[in-house]
Image (cartoon, rainbow, N blue to C red):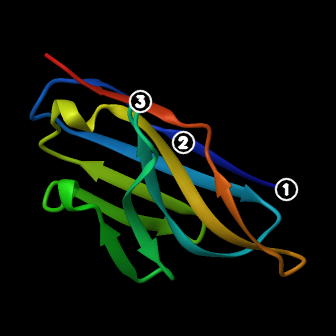
Amino acid sequence: QVQLVESGGGLVQPGGSLRLSCAASGRIRSINDMGWYRQAPGKQRELVAEVISGVNTNYADSVKGRFTVSRDNASGVSLQMNNLKPEDTAVYYCHAEVVDWDSVRDDYWGQGTQVTVSS
């Protein structure tokens, strides 16, 4: 099938920076949308940022001007997070809309990586 593997989470002080990376592998013909969601304790999972059809980007209002999402290559996506705030603390999940070798389109998720912003 398809696997998404994330890296780059951790503990950072307010105002600091982190970079998350995600690599997809498996029976992939192509990837359409790819990006990042997050889920804080007691809250629903929400979109953070995504690259749509490999070209356009979409950001949550709360991260505009601080986060930058980019496709690394045909099978990867990164999230550069600057000026982090305590409210950015959450588990961050990589998401990809994948078309597989059988031309079946489906959504895939990574296992999640913890980002904690605290002094």
Q: Earlier in the sequence, mark 2 or mark 1?
A: 1
Task: From the top left corner, tell me how far across and down residue 74 is, in percent.
Answer: 58, 72
Task: Name the residue beneath numbered marker 3.
Answer: 42
For residue 50, what is the image quadrant? bottom left
Kind of residue sitting beneath label 2: Glu
User: Would you name the residue on which mark 1 appears?
Assistant: 1
Rounded to the nearest angstrom, the CA distance separating label 3 from label 2 is 22 Å
Q: Is residue 71 left or right of residue 112?
A: left
The residue wearing badge 2 is 6
Which element type, helix, strand or loop, lies under badge 2? strand
Identify the element where label 1 is drawn: loop
Q: Residues within 10 Å of mark 3 (few under 14, many from 20)?
A: few
Give the quadrant of the N terminus: bottom right
The amino acid beneath tag 3 is: Gly
Q: List x then y, in percent, for residue 46.
A: 41, 52
Give the mark nearer the N terminus: 3 vs 2.
2
How far apart in space, not on screen, are marks 3 and 1 (Cα)? Answer: 31 Å
Residue 12's spot in the image, x, y percent? 23, 25
Pinpoint residue 69: horizontal percent, then vertical percent. Answer: 34, 62
Classify 116 as above or below 46: above
**Mark 2 burial class by Cα count in 10 Å: few <14, some 14-19, many 20+:** many
Q: Could you tell me if the residues under marks 3 and 2 are in contact, i.e. CB atoms within 8 Å?
A: no
